[in-house]
Amino acid sequence: MFGPTGWFFLGALIVCFGALLCWLVRARHWALRITAGVLAFALSTLFGAALVNQSYAYYTTWGALFDDLNGSGAVGYQTAMGSAAGQSVVHEDHDLQNFLPQRTPPISAPPAPVSPLPAATTSTVVSIGHLDLAARPATGTGRVVRLELSGAKSGISRQGYVYLPPQYFQAAYANTRFPVLELLHGDPGDPSSWIYGLHVPEVMDHAIDTGAIGPMVVVMPATFTGKHGDDCVDAPHGDLDDTYLSTDVPADLVADFRVLPQGVHWGIGGLSDGGFCAANLALRHPGDYGAVASMDGFYSSQADLAVLGKIFGSDAAALSANDPTMLALEERAPLPRFWIMSGTGNSVDTLAATYFVQAITTREQVEDVIVPGGTHTPPAWREVLPSMLVWWWNTLSGGPVGVGTSEAGPSHAPTPGHDKGPGSQPATRALAFELSGAASALRW
């Protein structure tokens, strides 16, 4: 009620705006009129921003807003120096320098084995071996590290965030390498939206504390430089975003933190444009990711020709090479596991998810999550985030995962990690789709 999305706050802005207008009309001195006018203009601008925030529910508390403005909640870390700087608002008495090692950290015990990918002729789905990590209740709080993620191959250097689970700092896990989630924000957007908008660190802490998931490292890189991005592709005459996100960021994580090598125990996901990026990168680089999750993404290069057409022009081959639907239909390599979410409140997102899910199910079963009434906004994404993390953990750790279509919500919460069994038939969306001629029909 009293938060930045509450009607009380919006009402207070209206009352103050009205009071300033009365002052403007009744004031006799020109200086007072100018002051009243400037303040009224500022309040009207603030009111517009508050309406946008209420619609998208990005900042739901004043604390989240202030944390984002002052950058608190994250500890600075200079990877080149191997030292930490700044204060953690969670554990101010803890010296992170003892736990964030120099590049290529020494590990006395061998890392957990990673299952090799089978040949494309033997399976259409990646084989993910079991990890020697358990999902059990754990006390403690994870840390968010703010650092510069530099790209040796792409030549790109951008600031990002890394979430380290509480187990990362515990003696029992001193020789353990952890699976990784790579989360890609939307456009417009930046990595902080995962921290202050979707509260990933808090959701991770709660899921780990309750034993719903095991320990995972989460990296949240910036997907572009400037106000808008290029859909995470390697632009012929621009930024090599694909190379940066699929090669350089994983290399930085492996070098600076105790994580498993990039492969089937790595997950990638995103929201909106980040959903397209996640699906496209995983399919363009078979074997680099074992699981993909997308919230309200799109899955065809034709869906964003305003951006991709400007990058690749009339190069049809380049457009096809960055089209997740077309790539999924090509049986050139085993597919990663997929988790796809959309809300019924946005028909564009629903259609995009429907076509992509049915394309994927020609080769493997998919976890298809529908949010009744959900729109292309953070509230819908926050609603499914906990179950998505559970699905990710079960998938990357080699455990059972859910398949088919399910509804998310207070009365339709999917059972975390529930496997409907190999003999069950996957549910489908209530939209007819002719699979014959899919290669052309899917390019809307």
Image (tube, rainbow, N blue to C red):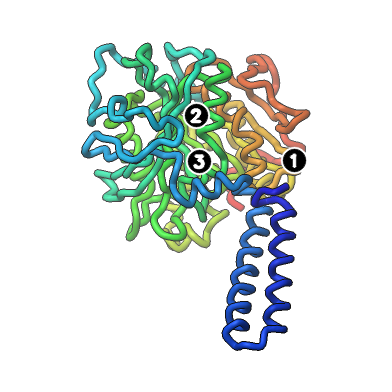
Instruction: Please name the residue shown 67% across and 53% down the image.
Output: 54
Q: Position of residue 87 (x, y in %)?
A: 37, 38
Residue that badge 3 annotates = 195
Quadrant in which residue 364 is drawn? top right
Q: Is residue 411 visible?
A: yes
Element class at badge 3: helix
Q: Nearer the viewer, residue 147 or 46?
A: 46
Nearest to viewer (mark 1 / mark 3): 3
Residue that badge 1 annotates = 432
Instruction: Please name the residue shown 73% across and 36% down the image.
Output: 429
Quadrant in which residue 437 is drawn? top right
Asked if residue 438 lies left or right of residue 9, the reply is left
Name the residue type under label 3. Answer: Ile
Q: Residues within 10 Å of mark 1 (few under 14, many from 20)?
A: few
Which of the two labelled residues, at mark 1 and mark 3, occupies the earlier sequence position? Answer: 3
Name the residue type under label 2. Answer: Ala
Disc 1 to disc 3, C-alpha distance: 38 Å
Residue that badge 2 annotates = 291
Q: Position of residue 319 (x, y in %)?
A: 46, 52
Q: Position of residue 239 (x, y in %)?
A: 34, 55
Q: Are marks 1 and 3 in contact (CB under 8 Å)?
A: no
Element class at badge 1: loop
Query: Which mark, residue 160?
Result: none
